[in-house]
Amino acid sequence: METFQLLSRGGVKFNKNRFASDASSSNDIDRGKSRELSSSQLPPELDFFRYAKNTSLPSNDTSKRKLDTQTQNETDEKSIDGKDSETFIPMKKRRKNSPEISGDEGETSSDVKKSKKQRVTSKGNNIPIPLESFEELTTRYDFPSRMLQNMGKNGWIEPTGIQAHGIPMILESRDLAAISPTGTGKTLTYLLPIIFKLHAPISQSIDHDVGKGVRALILAPTRELAHQIYNESLKICEGRKWRVVLYSKASAATLADKGVRDKTDILISTPLRLVASLKEKKIDLDNVRHLVLDEADRMLDTEFLSQVNEIVASCPHGSLQTSVFSATLPGSAEQVAMKMLKDPIRVIVGLKDTPLPSIRQSLVYVADETSKLPSLISYLTSTSVPSTDPAAPPSWAPPILIFTSTQSRATSLYTNLMLYNLPNVDVLHASLSNAQRMDVIRRMREGKCWILVCTKVMARGMDFKGIRGVINYDIPNNVQSYVHRIGRTGRAGRDGFAITYWTDEDGPYMKTLANVLLQSGSHVPEWMLKLPKPSQLKRRQMGRAKRGDEVTAASRIGKMDSVKKRDMILASKRRKGNVAEKKDGSCSIDEMEWSGFNT
Ligand SMILES: Nc1ncnc2c1ncn2[C@@H]1O[C@H](COP(=O)(O)OP(=O)(O)OP(=O)(O)O)[C@@H](O)[C@H]1O
């Protein structure tokens, strides 16, 4: 009822006062001032950031959540207490004699001291001893103090689970398949040891066998993610003249010059652009000694596999060390990955293909397509106290991401949210120009975007620390996609929420999602768990229900009023020459100046 009232008014009012504090606290998060909470509030085995003492911990009521007691028992049985750091045993000796790792072969569930708390399963031969602290990088591996300083400057004080285990593996030149939940620091897990192993920028190396040309290659599925990895690498490299190149049209042209190419240390690219250059012989990868596939399951799916194979085949160096990283790695992708790796170690942090328990997940039934938009608008504009039902969504706070299944639906939803006067809304999908995409990312990082409507281009890897929540306007195509989408929130030890709208047509897949919620400690209504399990064939159709190209405008009268109002505002803005035309014909306005927001 409330929804219809809202919509028939021709737009909703946004409670600026209500969100003023949220906006400022969201900015605070970005500035690292987020609330400090005691780690005791989080069940220890779910505390992926237990090491990162200086980051805030989830404030969610995770303690109430279901714990995977079976997992806990398994961990307790398999984990072996580590040694005190005082009784340091040199690395090689430790590996042979250390009581910490049971056996050199087969599956060992090994953990560092104190980390009985966290399930980490490593499988492979001669598994290196995990780190207990980043200081061990100096004592065990002779890391330069500059690198440790750079880490400290960025607040990376203690290793996360995947870092404690994965960094020594790469440092000890092992091929690696690493699976660790979203937002647990996988990027640093490969960047840090690779940069260390490169020893010095190629332009300054005298004594080392450095060869000529790119020595480390990192592949990521999207430009945005490649850019983000590039930025992370600059943080580690600060203070030395490393040449790290983000492969783009412009840098590809520059690197076509062999003189420039020979002085490049690290290349970060999407597969498509690199393959194009390989074909034109504008780049060679003969000197690559470290290859990383980030978001490995995506990189090894049908869309990218042939390109990735071509790239791997173009890296012939005898001591090539390869690692694959992802938060999810289904069996089929894992098989492909394992074939690429030599004597690999497979390390899994937490439960495979499971979201972080610090993300409070809700599945919201909305009957049909036409009810989705009113439900969303009602949710985003509601000022009422949230339901006490633990399975119900909490009230929201910006910034949030809203995922749709297609670009046209993203654009249409964005337009609708604008029409309903929601402030600081933006849209991002793959058809926008590079500059437009970068502009949205910048606005997001600066806290100027409160609601970002997006497609899967934003689902993987993107790290905006302060994202409070994710809304799946359209359900994703599979569990992995669900895990990655909602993993944009609850990062680096923070909490978050995730809401998934589902219609009658989505019904057959809800049992699958309900199980994911249950596994990761979110509340699921009893009846949902009793739903029939979809067949494998059915599961492949998940998220593919026929939907309109546009999200349905729920109230024609309301919409007409809003359109009129929007046009008046835009006309006024245009007169002031203050409007930037966007590719899709809509306009990007500084919404804080938008009179609709101030009503
Ligand atoms: N040891 C650490 N202590 C504190 N923060 C850290 C640490 N390591 C990484 N981070 C921060 O955690 C955030 C998430 O890291 P990152 O993007 O590498 O996660 P991820 O595991 O790759 O996630 P995804 O699976 O979504 O790609 C980043 O902002 C990063 O700076």
Image: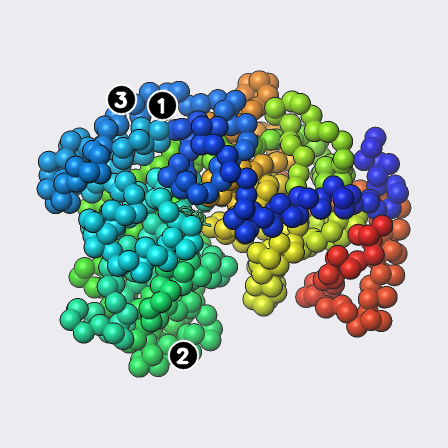
| Residue type pointed to by label 2 | Thr
At horizontal 30% and vertical 63% (from top left) the residue drawn is 216
Q: Is residue 136 left or right of residue 239?
A: left
Q: Do the numbered discs 1 and 3 sit on residues whose CB atoms are within 8 Å? A: no
How far across and how far down the image is residue 270, in percent?
A: 43, 61
Q: Is residue 534 left or right of residue 371?
A: left
Q: Is residue 144 left or right of residue 389?
A: left
* Of the image marks 3 and 2, the number of the one nearer the N terminus: 3
Let me know if residue 149 appears in the view.
yes
Q: Which residue is mark 3?
A: 77
At horizontal 78% and vertical 59% (from top left) the residue drawn is 593
How far across and how far down the image is residue 47, in percent?
A: 42, 33
Depth order, front residue of 547/61 = 61
Quarter of the picture containing the N terminus is top right
Q: Which residue is mark 1?
A: 72
* Of the image marks 1 and 3, the number of the one nearer the N terminus: 1
Q: CA distance from mark 3 to mark 2?
A: 55 Å
* Of the image marks 1 and 2, the number of the one nearer the N terminus: 1
Q: Residues within 10 Å of mark 1 (few under 14, many from 20)?
A: some
| Residue type pointed to by label 1 | Gln
Depth order, front residue of 190/59 = 59
At horizontal 88% and vertical 43% (from top left) the residue drawn is 9
